[in-house]
Every structure is written in structure tokens, then in C-alpha cells.
Image (spheres, rainbow, N blue to C red):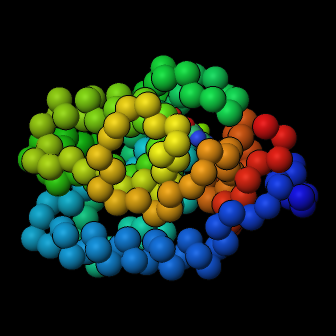
Amino acid sequence: MFMTRQGSCSRVLLSATQIQERVRALGARITEDYRDRSLVVLAVLKGSCVFASDLIREIDLPLRVEFLGVASYGDGTRTTGIVQITQDLTAPIVGDDVLVVEDIVDTGLTLRYLLQLLELRGPRTLNVCALLHKPGRTREPIDIDYVGFTIDDEFVVGYGLDHRQLYRNLPYVGVLDDR
Ligand code: IMP
Ligand code: MG
């Protein structure tokens, strides 16, 4: 167990260096896969703000960035499955190759909802890149095209992920202590 300025973590799960290496590899794969496409990187806020910022700098292609603001009701450590859109895209995505960037796929309820919503906007392709996946808790089987790390069922914070809106600025991913 160790203290951060925001509360206690039981341990570091993914160090800043581990994350950086993985993000670099994901960026290289995406660069290969999206050559000659009309790439729109769609970052789901707030959780993916840090991951998306690092990821786009590892993609060596022309691309557009869009943000979709999303809040799962409840600020605890469990998803309710009710998703509130807090900020919409600034441009149409019709005919574009959209890559949705998520912080974590837990139950999969949020992502399923978002994919259904985005499909209606007529993208040419719609794929998903998630930094973290907790397959042990996934209730909605979803095809995640790019996964950073597969993790156990523990509540994690840092590198964009929050608990009650805090911890997002930790440069590593840690396991929250006080679940
Ligand atoms: P899902 O709908 O259960 O897949 O969860 C989606 C959202 O819940 C994520 O985008 C996160 O904002 C939040 N979430 C799920 N697990 C964690 C976690 O371990 N730490 C921080 N946030 C989480
Ligand atoms: Mg959250």
C-alpha cells in the first residue's frame, strides 16, 4: 500500500514506462491498419483523455480528433449501464473510418451503447481501441480491435481513470485500495 496525494493505492499495476511501450506498439499497428483511410480518432471523455493524447502522437498518419463526452451515472466503482452524453461530436463522421478510444471496457455496457449510437451516424468503419479490458466482468460480448492490457477484476485509477473524479493525473495505473 502507498499514498498518493489523492488517496491510497494498494499497488502500481502498470508503470508509466510499461504504458508508454504498449501505446507505442498500438500506435504502430494502427498506423499500418489505417493507411489511406479517413481516420477519425474519437476519444471518449473523460477517461480516455490521457491515453488518447499519447496514442495520437504514436499514429503517423493524417487524422482528425473528435471527443464524445460520456458520464456513467453514479460516481462509485460500479457502472449502472445508464450512459449520459455530456458533449457531442463537432463534425459528421459519415463515410469516415472511426476509431473509438476508450479507457477501459468493464461490463461493456457503455461501449455497446456508444457503438449503437455512433453506427447511426454512418461511419464507413467503426472500430475500438481500449487501454484496458477486464474480461472477467464483461457482460456484453464486444469485439475490441485493439487492447492495451487485459487486467483482473480490480478497480484501477490513474492515466485518465478516476475514482470520484480524482486520480486521473497519476502517470501510472494503480489499484485503488479503498473499494
Ligand atoms: P462499463 O460500461 O462497465 O464497461 O464501464 C465503463 C466505464 O466505467 C469506463 O469507461 C470507466 O469510466 C468506468 N470504469 C470501469 N471500470 C473502472 C476501473 O477499474 N477504474 C476506473 N473506472 C472504471
Ligand atoms: Mg469513470
Residue at position x 19%, y 70% from top?
33
x, y percent for residue 39: 21, 60
Q: Is residue 158 above or below residue 72?
A: below
Taking 34 as reference, is 157 left or right?
A: right
x, y percent for residue 150: 50, 57
Q: Quadrant of the N terminus?
A: bottom right
Residue at position x 28%, y 35% from top?
115
x, y percent for residue 136: 52, 42
Q: Quadrant of residue 118?
A: top left
Residue at position x 53%, y 30% from top?
71
Question: Which residue ends up furthest to the front in the rendered image?
Answer: 136
Q: Is residue 46 above or below residue 60?
A: above
Give the quadrant of ligand 2.
Answer: top right
Taking 2 as reference, is 53 left or right?
A: left
Residue at position x 35%, y 28% from top?
113
Q: How many numbered badges does the structure rendering display? A: 0
Q: Quadrant of residue 120?
A: top left
Of residue 97 and residue 2, the one placed in the foreground of this image is: 2
Q: Is residue 3 above or below residue 76?
A: below
Q: Quadrant of residue 36?
A: bottom left
Q: Can the viewer see residue 91 in this picture?
A: yes
Q: Can the viewer see residue 69 in this picture?
A: no
x, y percent for residue 27: 36, 73
Of residue 136 and residue 7, the one placed in the foreground of this image is: 136
Taking 174 as reference, is 95 left or right?
A: left
Q: Quadrant of the C terminus?
A: top right
